[in-house]
Image: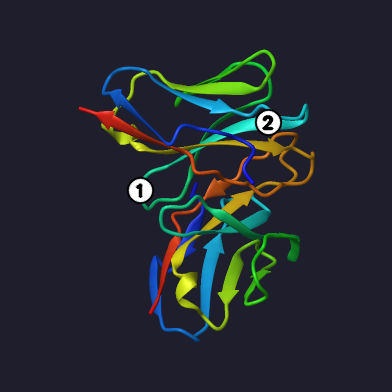
Amino acid sequence: DAGVTQSPTHLIKTRGQQVTLRCSPKSGHDTVSWYQQALGQGPQFIFQYYEEEERQRGNFPDRFSGHQFPNYSSELNVNALLLGDSALYLCASSLARGGLVIIQYFGPGTRLTVL
Amino acid sequence: DAKTTQPPSMDCAEGRAANLPCNHSTISGNEYVYWYRQIHSQGPQYIIHGLKNNETNEMASLIITEDRKSSTLILPHATLRDTAVYYCIVRVVRGNRDDKIIFGKGTRLHILP
């Protein structure tokens, strides 16, 4: 059973460009959450998708957008990249209908470097 | 802001038990305690969770005080591979709804050979 997978592993972009990161959830999971982790910090919640809709959003600007597909996979898009967007981007999946206790499982992350 | 307080770093000798404390004095009755760890440059790994009873799985044990204001994660026989940042998190569980995880700074655990 494959866990959460993310692509690409690493990415280098320049300021002003746009980037798309991809996530495939753990088999059977229906909810995808995205986090940004700057160097030396804990992960920060960006947003969460459930049933192809954004359900929750953290304190991130509209330059950060996402999408969830019918197969539950998800994309994170960042427009007009800034140097400060350099970070490890983490995807986590969970099963919202999994009962009382819900566990988010994380992927390995995509390391984005903005030059 | 994170609802937990953890020491920034700890050392433990290989083969000994590692005991990681967490303070969550404002925890609510419907909040669970979760522990994750993050090995350098990897995604966080789920370890264990609990509500009020002590819990044990193949990775660790979780001891929650009776008043639920603090907890301890125990790695019974630490190995070098347990060197990581350990995050203690409290989360509301709302039934058919997942919720965001708010990470604090965690505890950087060094296992010494």
Label 1 chain ID? B
Secondary structure type for disc 2: strand
Label 2 chain ID? B
Residue drawn at x 72%, y 32% is B31
Residue drawn at x 34%, y 19% is B77
Residue A55 is situated, as x and y percent measured from the top left of the image, at 76, 59
Q: Is residue A97 left or right of residue A105?
A: right
Res. A76 image quadrant: bottom right
| Amino acid found under the numbered disc labelled 1 | His
Q: Is residue B90 left or right of residue A10?
A: right
A31 or A114: which is nearer to us?
A: A114
**Same subunit, tags 1 and 2:** yes
Secondary structure type for disc 1: loop
B93 or A26: which is nearer to us?
A: B93
| Amino acid found under the numbered disc labelled 2 | Tyr
Residue drawn at x 67%, y 20% is B68
Q: Is residue A27 above or below residue B84?
A: below
**Residue B40: which disc?**
1
Residue A26 is situated, as x and y percent measured from the top left of the image, at 56, 51
Tag 2 residue: B32
Q: How is the image coloured?
A: rainbow
Residue A1 is situated, as x and y percent measured from the top left of the image, at 50, 46
What whole-number distance in Å separates the C-alpha atoms at marks 1 and 2?
26 Å
